[in-house]
Amino acid sequence: MENGNETRQCVLVTGASGGIGGCIARAFAEAGWRVGVHYNSGQEAARALHEALPGEGHLLLQADIARPEAVQAMVHEAAQSWGRLDALVNNAAIGRQHAVADVSYEEWQAAWQGVLSINLLAAANACYCAARQMMQQPEGGRIVNVGSRGGYRGEPRFTAYGASKAALHSLSQSLAQELAPHNIFVTAVAPGFVEGGMAQARLAGPQGDAIRAQSPLGRVARPEEVARTVLFLASPGSEFLTGAVVDINGASYLR
Ligand SMILES: NC(=O)c1ccc[n+]([C@@H]2O[C@H](COP(=O)([O-])OP(=O)(O)OC[C@H]3O[C@@H](n4cnc5c(N)ncnc54)[C@H](OP(=O)(O)O)[C@@H]3O)[C@@H](O)[C@H]2O)c1
């Protein structure tokens, strides 16, 4: 069938209730995709986004992705509803400050466990579940993982966050090699600071100007710039980018 819902591409975007995830979901919907709007606690934001998306066939999916069985159920629900899954965007994440000088040993462990369980293990589990679905599709699929400049540059006081993103880049590269024979292409993006999401308080605070000055453009990224890159990486024609980790940092950190 060459028209109708059956041939429109389908993407699951985790953390679509957040600043960057919402923008990614909108970019896909505007490009004609059906979008799985995933959220955990941000039901209101996710519902409003879901209602406002152009096009039809979008899904609203709640899951606490710290729970492996919830990740599996989320991917299963999307794939069952659409009968396919063309792309997964692992965007959901948390940042938690835990400076060595400030936290107890118990707090240190809790921060590492909490951050790694969301930013790395949940993403790895979603990759597994999505890839198993995509392997059954002759056309395969795409996975785009939202990493961070911090995975390369270091994240003092947010060490678990930086480590989780470095590992997510590595996971993307390994899976790109492993899954290419199945027509599944895996990439990551590594943004520096972005307007409107988890870094909003830092950008609005006393460090804001210094952060913007890290780029010769004198600003941080706009979420739309991240969204456009993710859409490009997930779209047909980008196959040979598989394994790439694309910097989106306004030349603030060159590697
Ligand atoms: N903002 C930046 O400057 C920046 C820079 C580089 C990279 N990034 C990356 O960009 C991505 C999006 O960040 P953002 O700034 O848009 O953050 P955000 O606005 O805080 O959004 C985070 C998202 O993650 C979801 N999430 C958190 N814990 C979850 C859990 N246990 N289960 C399910 N979902 C969970 C949240 O869902 P609920 O709200 O529904 O609970 C929310 O949708 C992240 O991967 C982040 O590391 C951000």
Image (tube, helix red, strand yellow):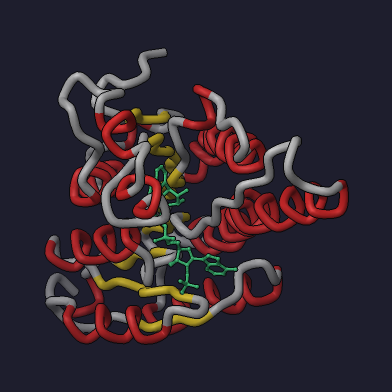
Q: Residue 213: x, y in percent?
A: 25, 25
Task: Kindly identify the residue that appears in the image at 41 percent across and 85 percent down.
Answer: 43
Q: Is residue 177 visible?
A: no
Residue 232 placed where, x, y %? 23, 43
The residue at the far top in this view is 255
Above or below 177: residue 82: below
Q: Nearer the viewer, residue 191 or 51?
A: 191
Residue at the farthest right position:
105
Residue 121 lies left or right of residue 152; in this view the side is: right
Residue at the image point whose x is 68% and y is 45% from the top: 98
In the image, residue 130 sits, relative to residue 161, either above or below, namely below
> What residue is at 50 percent from the left and 80 percent from the top?
41
The x and y percentages for residue 153 are 50, 22
Q: Is residue 227 left or right of residue 179?
A: left
Q: Quadrant of residue 126?
A: bottom right
- Screen quadrant of the C terminus: top left
Residue 57 or 44: which is nearer the viewer?
44
Q: Ligand 1 appears in which quadrant?
A: bottom left
